Image (cartoon, rainbow, N blue to C red):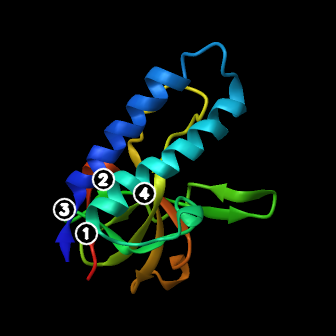
Amino acid sequence: MRDVTAVFDHYRLSARSVWNTAFWPDPDLRGWDSVEQFGAIENILFDSVVLAKLDVDFPRTEVFQRPIPFFSVTPVSSTVPIMIQCPRPEAPKGYWDDPIDRVSAGEVEMHFVSFFDWNQLDYRDLQYYNVSIAGFDEQPHLVGREALIERQYVRVLLVD
C-alpha cells in the first residue's frame, strides 16, 4: 500500500478552487445547472489529477458514483469521529446519524466514493470524504453503508 493522501489533497484544492472562483459566485450560472456543469469538470479533473497521476484505471462514468476499491481511506489515529448513514424508508439516502460515531485505525475498511459538502450550491471546502464501509468486524451490519469522515482524520492508501 502506498500513501496517496497528497494526491487527493491536490485534487481537493484544485476542485475547490474551480468551484469557488468560477462557478459559485457567477450570477450567469444559476443553481443546479452550475452544479451539473461543474460535475462534468470535476470528473475530468479527478481522472487527470488522481487516476492518471497514479496510473490506475477506473471508468470515468463511475467516478463519484460507486466506491473505488483500490483507494482505502484509513483513520490516522486510535479513534476518530465518523458519521455513518442510517437508512430510513422516508429518506432514500437516510441520515448520517448511526449511533456508531467513532472508528479506530485497523478496525474498519473504507473505500473512497467522493468528496462531500453539505450544501452543493454554496462555497465548497470538500472537508469530508464520502466513503463506503467495506469491512467492519465488530459492526458487520454497517458493511455497505456510506459514511462521512473529515479529511484531517484520515489518509488515503493506494492498495496494490
Q: Return the residue at label 2.
A: 8
Label 1, secondary structure: give it: strand
Mark 3 or 2, nearer chain start: 2
Q: Return the residue at label 3.
A: 77
Across and down, in percent, residue 29 comes to 66, 21
Mark 3 or 1, nearer chain start: 3
- Tell me the distance, in whole angstroms, between the alpha carbons under discs 3 and 2: 19 Å
Q: Residue furthest top?
A: 27
Q: Give the residue type at disc 1.
A: Leu
Q: Give the residue type at disc 4.
A: Asp
Across and down, in percent, residue 4 comes to 22, 62
- Tell me the distance, in whole angstroms, between the alpha carbons under discs 1 and 4: 17 Å
In the drawing, does residue 77 fall left or right of residue 134? left
Label 3 with label 1: CB-CB less than 8 Å: no
- Tell me the distance, in whole angstroms, between the alpha carbons under discs 3 and 4: 29 Å
Across and down, in percent, residue 90 comes to 81, 57
* Mark 3 vs mark 4: in front: 4
* Mark 3 vs mark 1: in front: 1
**Screen quadrant of the C terminus:** bottom left
Q: Identify whether 97 is placed above or below 121.
A: below
Q: Identify whether 55 is placed above or below 128.
A: below
Q: Return the residue at label 1.
A: 157
- Tell me the distance, in whole angstroms, between the alpha carbons under discs 2 and 1: 10 Å
Q: Which residue is found at the position 51% from the left and 79% from the top?
A: 143
* Mark 4 vs mark 2: in front: 4
In the drawing, does residue 37 fall left or right of residue 134? right
Q: Which residue is found at the position 57% from the left and 66% from the top?
A: 62
